[in-house]
Image (cartoon, rainbow, N blue to C red):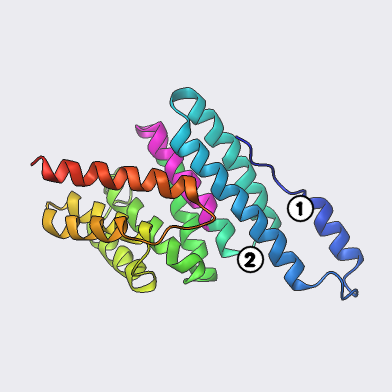
Amino acid sequence: MQMRKLNYAIFATIFALTLSSAALSESAIDTALLSSIAQLQKGWAEVNYQSQGDQQLEEFAVLLERATALVDANPQAAPAYIWRGIIESTYAGAKGGLGALKFAKAAKADLEKALELEPEAMSGSAYTSLGTLYFNVPGWPIAFGSDKKAQALLTKALTLNPDGIDSNYFYASFMQSQGRDEEARNFFLKAQRAAPRADRPLADAGRQKEISEALAALDAK
């Protein structure tokens, strides 16, 4: 991975020493946080779509460490929790088996924290990611899976981001998991038509490939 983490310990020290200075305003902190979030997004796309096998697992572990450092430095920032949750949940999917459950549960806790702090952060991404977790993990007594909760969360995500590629893709995936293929097709097609995100070309390319594969699978039935 090429992602590099800003040194937030040094940044925080400088901030404490210059709190009275107008030069280091709240907007400067926001800019630093947004920069680090962008690096996490880029790193996640590289690991998720360009790495495989043991190398992918190792890179997810490193990416998770960086996300944790970001959360520790910004404990009131919902986007930091969202991205750690996304990394944890994707890491869980890559690992598979019972060993993945601790990462799925950690992701659930982070996404719930993000909803507590700022429910509409990142166009409701916490709703999308948490809903996806609910329909992908086993139910009780093994884990916390729930199709009912998944639908409620994914529906909420769509109300906040009706034209987003991810909100539509994951709702479509849920519909497909429920055997509601025509509804799934409609939402996959809507995801396919989503406007490109200029700052996330690799993630968009990877998601579009997944959409095409899902539509092909539906056509093959």
104 sits to left or right of 153: right
Do the residues under discs 1 and 2 have CB atoms within 8 angstroms? Answer: no
Q: Nearer the viewer, residue 109 or 37?
A: 37
The answer to which image quadrant residue 137 occupies is top left
Which residue lies under the disc numbered 1? 8
Cα distance between the residues tagged 1 and 2: 14 Å
Give the labeled residue for mark 2.
76
Q: Amino acid at mark 1?
A: Tyr
State yes or no: residue 218 in magenta: no
- Residue at the location (76% across, 67% down)? 28
User: Residue 131: x, y in percent?
Assistant: 34, 58
Give the magenta-colored segment's residue range: 82-100
Residue drawn at x 84%, y 69% is 24
Q: Is residue 163 above or below residue 63?
A: below
Residue name at image x 69 percent, y 66 percent: 30
Q: Indicate yes or no whether the magenta region holds residue 92.
A: yes
- Sequence-first tag of 1 and 2: 1
Q: Which residue is painted at 25% across and 41% down in the image?
A: 213
Residue type at mark 2?
Gln
The answer to whether 147 appears left or right of 121 in the picture is left
Q: Position of residue 45 (x, y in %)?
A: 49, 43
